[in-house]
Amino acid sequence: MSCDVLVVGGGIAGLACARHLVRDGLDVKLFEADERVGGRLKTDLVDGFRLDRGFQVLITSYPEVRDSLDLDALQLGRFIPGARCRVDGGWRDVRDPWRDPLSIPRSLLRGVGSWSDYAKLATLRRKARAGTLDDLLAAPAKSTAERLREAGFSERMLHTFLEPWLSGIFLESDLATSDRFLFFVLRMFADGHAALPHDGMEAIATQVAAELPPGVVHTRARVRSATPTSVTLENGESMSARAVVVALEGGAAARLQGLAPTPPPRPVRAVYYAAERDPVGAPLLVLDGEGRGPVNHLAVPSTVQPSYAPAG
């Protein structure tokens, strides 16, 4: 059996690849080892609660999101741009001053940042939004930590907001991540929102998969080996194609192709709790601005998207 292209992996990368190829008129087969597609974009229904596998959000301004998804059909619930920070034993809100200018005096009075900090943030934001994304990602790079230090932010602004916020995005606390990604993140958050789909993050993968014709997606089909023009499944079945696309996470892709190991992943853990009431009271991300505990950030998904919890 043969076709034009074989895609290994039914995560969002594999699904998007298959959709592009099908739209171009190619005969495509996609193999996914799990019982359903989605990869990391999985949502489990437990006692009426929608639990994404790990804390995830959809950033509405990502170019591929705007070009590839029907956002209205996802029925998004949106976070308020900003965060609530734990500082000096209390809570301080930091809002996006470009969307909520009246929040600046409140933030200043409550001791989160200074006028100078907001001016420096404006400078970074302007740089992030200048030129094209290609220009941004091709610029000379340094670590995010270096960039923030050179920008001259106060220690309080760094420790209570910027460091925990960016650590939650980069999944590393040293902020060694390239400042190209810092500018990319600032640009995306300036132009869009963090949001949750009505049916959970898996709805994104489900929407893309729904556009593929019957017979393209094969679940419970683990690939044992792959070459540039063929794959062999664990059950011994083989298929050939003009090309094979391996759309797996780095470690699995390297093992399948016999390549050098990739850098180790950055492990994180999400813990879900049910509560009688919302302890935050607003669709805000909550940050540990004191750096005293193992929890970097907290959110109440059902306040952002009520469908994440059963009624009552």
Image (cartoon, grey):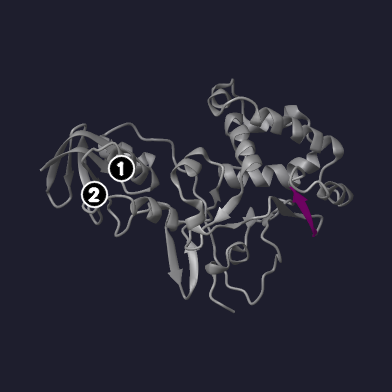
First in sequence: mark 2 or mark 1? 1
Q: Nearer the viewer, residue 86 or 105?
A: 105
Q: Tell me what residue is drawn at x 70 percent, y 33 percent.
A: 125
Q: In this rendering, does residue 95 appear at all? A: yes
Look at the image and say whether residue 93 sits in the magenta stretch.
yes
Residue 216 - label: 2
Residue 1 - label: none
Marks 1 and 2: in contact by CB < 8 Å? Answer: yes
Q: Tell me what residue is drawn at x 34 percent, y 54 percent.
A: 210
- The residue segment tinted magenta is 90-95
Residue 187 appears at what percent x and percent y? 63, 36
Task: Give the residue furthest to the top.
Answer: 140
Q: Which residue is mark 1?
A: 18
Look at the image and say whether residue 42 sits in the magenta stretch.
no
The quarter of the picture where residue 189 lies is top right
Image height of 61 relative to 271, above or below: above
Q: Nearer the viewer, residue 80 or 89?
A: 80
Residue 71 appears at what percent x and percent y? 50, 52
Cα–Cα gap, marks 2 and 1: 8 Å
